[in-house]
Amino acid sequence: MAQKSPILSPRALPPDVTPKVLERQCGAYTGHYGPFDYRSAHPSDKGIVEKYHFENEYAAFLAGKLTADTYGSSGLEVGKGFQYVLNSFPNHPEALMAMERLGTRLKSERPQNTQYPLECWYVRALKTVPDDPVVRVMYGIYLTNRGRNEEALNNLDQADAELHDDANMQYNIGLMYFKLGKFEKAQLCALRASAQGFRLNGLETMLRKANRWNSQIQLPAAEPEPANDGPAPAASVETKSP
C-alpha cells in the first residue's frame, strides 16, 4: 500500500535533551514504512501498521505474554511489533509505553534484542517530532523510573505546560510528580484531571495517604473546578504490568 502521510526527516535534538546513549546508536530514519507523525498520519497508514504489527502484540503483552500470534505467523516476540510501530510512528504513545514496560518486565534496556537501547526510542521521537508534548511525558516517565530526576522534571514541566486540557496526560504527569516529590504539582494535575471528568482517583488517594493533600491548593481562577461526574477515563498510561 502506498504511503499517504508526509515522511518525517530527523532534526537536531532539542538542546535541553541530554541522553546517555549516543545518537549514532539510535540508527537511521529510512528504510522502513514511514516515519510519520502519529498525530496527523493518514488513517490508512495508521491502520495498516497497527493491524499487522501492534494490535495482537499489545493484547498479548497485556495478557502477560511475550509472544503473539499475528497474521500468517505465530510465536513472534511482542517487542518486534512494538519496534516496527515505533520505526513507523516515533511518537506512538502506546508503543513507547509498551516498549518501556517490556524493558521493565524483562529487566533489560534492550528487551528481546530489539534494534536500539530503550532511550533511543525517545531520542528518535524527539528528533523527528520535537513539538509533541506527549513524547515529553513518555520520556519523563522513562527518566523518572531511572532516577534521572532533574531531566525528568524538565521534560514533565514542558509537557505539563502544554497539556492542561488532556485529562489522561495530566493524571500521568501527576503520578510522576508524586514519585519525584513534587506534591503541589501532583495535586494540581489531579485537580485538572478531575475537572475534566477523569474518574480515577488513585493520585489523590496517594497524596492523602502521604499526608500531602493540601486543601488550600486550588486550580487557578481561569481553570475549571473539579467536576462531580464525567465520562469514564481513558486508560492511564502508567499502569502496572500484568
Image (spheres, rainbow, N blue to C red):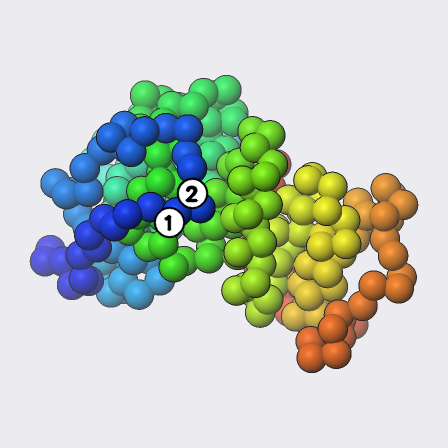
From the top left corner, tell me how far across and down residue 67 is, in percent: 37, 27
Q: Secondary structure at mark 2?
A: loop
Q: The residue under label 1 is which amino acid type? A: Pro
Residue at the spot 45% in from the left edge and 20% down from the top edge:
108
Q: Is residue 203 visible?
A: no
Q: Position of residue 126 (x, y in %)?
A: 36, 48
Question: Which of the 4 image quarters holds residue 196?
Answer: bottom right
In-front residue for pair 152/91:
152
**Dot 2 amino acid type:** Val
Q: Quadrant of residue 192?
A: bottom right
Q: Are marks 2 and 1 in contact (CB under 8 Å)?
A: yes
Determine whether, in the image, residue 182 is placed left or right of residue 128: right
Q: Nearer the viewer, residue 14 or 73?
A: 14
Q: Single out the residue that lies furthest toward the bottom.
A: 222
Q: Which label was assigned to residue 17? A: 2
Q: Which residue is at 62% across, 58% downward?
A: 170
Residue 212 percent across, percent down from the top left: 85, 48
Quadrant housing the C terminus:
top right
Residue drawn at x 56%, y 29% as measured from the top left: 146
Closest to the observer: 206 or 12?
A: 12
What residue would you read off at disc 1?
A: 14
Secondary-structure class at tag 1 = loop
Task: Identify the residue at image location x=67%, y=63%.
Answer: 193
